[in-house]
Image: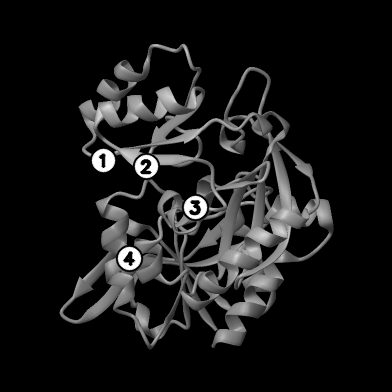
Amino acid sequence: MKIAFQMDPIGSVDINADSSFRLAEEAQVRGHELFFYLPDNLAYQQGRITARGQDMTVQRVPGDPAVLGNMREVDLRDFDVVWLRQDPPFDMHYITSTHLLDRLKPDTLVVNDPFWVRNYPEKLLVLDFPDLTPPTTIARNIDTLRAFKKEHGDIILKPLYGNGGAGVFKLNADDRNLSSLHELFTGFSREPLIVQKYLPAVRKGDKRVILIDGEAVGAINRVPAEGETRSNMHVGGRPEKVGLTDRDLEICATIGPLLKEKGQVFVGIDVIGDYLTEINVTSPTGIQELERFDGVNIAAKVWDAIEARL
């Protein structure tokens, strides 16, 4: 098959952690042809969806993860699969790319399905499952946020469309910084904020469960660094081996059918204690860590699911 990766610069990836690299590596082992391009080089041209990029051969060489060919323009309808793999923030640039990629249907399979990526960003899809999630409010109005804090005491405040733990704050019941943080966020963004009741279980870790075509295939636990509330590996969270609990399986059984129906082939959900906090569909991570802990070829399972869809 011909496979295109729309992603952040390939030259800067960590070959031992990056999930996009691992997906490309497995595709290459299967004999598929790889093409790489940046989101900025995606275009609509008189009915054609094109990309300027380079043929790619990945290699497990530190600091040199890929050999790239000459820059050329391609029609993405000539490809079997296009991977939507750039990292958030989920801004208008990101949303526009989903609109353009959506025009490739039915000729080319885009993973994950861009229509539903656009409509199911990480912190919003969980609102469909209130019985699985901690108390949550999304608002821009400071009085609404204050009322939530007054009701629940310790809270987590974060940008609605952020990623990687950036801009995440824990506010204790007696913390007086809510108004200042509200001024800071609303001063540079028109987006609302999301607040959730703080879950003390996060001290034991924030579990990343990976689902492929709606089925749970494993999990890793991400333990916050000393003095940190955030468990994201981008900010020093430590991955460790962990199994799936009955509650994890219950959560996956509830959300899995919807993910499969909407073409969300590779998804990573976040579970703290007994609660679902995020459903990551834009550019989930965790494949390589899970493969090392469990000794299972997760990338192969992803490609098996894609090839079955084709």
Judging by the rendered image, the residue that carries numbered circle 4 is 98
Instruction: Specify the amino acid type for callout 3.
Output: Pro
Give coordinates of residue 255: x percent, y percent: 56, 65
Tell me: residue 200, above or below residue 308.
above
For the point 59% across and 69% down, the residue is 256
Instruction: Specify the amino acid type for callout 2.
Output: Leu
What's the mark number on residue 130?
A: 3
Secondary element under disc 1, as helix, strand or loop, is: loop
Judging by the rendered image, the residue that carries numbered circle 2 is 160
Spatial CA distance of label 2 from label 3 is 17 Å
Q: Earlier in the sequence, mark 2 or mark 3?
A: 3
Give coordinates of residue 224: x percent, y percent: 66, 29
Secondary element under disc 2, as helix, strand or loop, is: loop
Quadrant in which residue 138 is drawn: top left
Spatial CA distance of label 4 from label 2 is 18 Å
Crowd band around label 1 with a 10 angstrom C-alpha radius: few (<14), some (14–19), many (20+): some
Spatial CA distance of label 1 from label 2 is 7 Å
Q: Nearer the viewer, mark 3 or mark 1?
A: 3
Crowd band around label 2 with a 10 angstrom C-alpha radius: few (<14), some (14–19), many (20+): many
Image quadrant occupied by the N terminus: bottom right
Give coordinates of residue 89: x percent, y percent: 37, 45
